[in-house]
Amino acid sequence: MEKDLIEYIAKSLVDSPSAVEVNIIEGEKSTMMELKVATKDIGKVIGRHGRIAKAIRTILQAATMRLGKRTMLEILD
């Protein structure tokens, strides 16, 4: 579910939606999600001063709060 949410948001923001990849790394108490987009679209996902990235992380935390797990999002170059 979380993977689909991040993919949907990222594909809505970028010019090359086919280049969006989300990898999930599961841990005992936390989950790390890695978002990879095309090089030219990194700025669109991060936003000015990281505002869009922060908003995506906030939405992700709200969506996973009921599961009792900590979820982190890392945007890869």
Image (cartoon, rainbow, N blue to C red):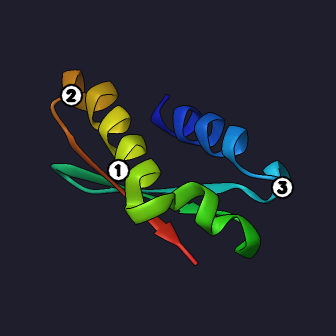
Q: Residue at x 29, y 30 (%)?
A: 64
- Amino acid under disc 3: Ser
Residue 74 placement: quadrant: bottom left
- Residue 12 vertical placement versus 21 (above, below): above
Local secondary structure at mark 2: helix
- On the image, numbered disc 1 is attached to which residue? 54
Which x, y percent locates residue 2?
46, 34
Circle 3 residue: 16
Label 2 is placed on what type of residue? Met
Total marks shown come to: 3
- Decide: few, some or many residues near mark 1? Use Cα within 10 Å; few <14, some 14-19, many ≥20: some
- Horizontal side of residue 35 vs 2, given as left or right: right
Crowd rating for badge 2 (residues with CA inside 10 Å; few <14, some 14–19, many 20+): few
Query: Marks 3/1: CA distance?
Result: 21 Å
Which of pointers 2 and 1 lies earlier in the amino acid sequence? 1
Q: Residue at x 57, y 56 (%)?
A: 45
Q: Residues within 10 Å of mark 3 (few under 14, many from 20)?
A: some
The residue indicated by pointer 2 is 65
User: Is the residue under label 1 in contact with that under label 3 (CB below 8 Å)?
Assistant: no
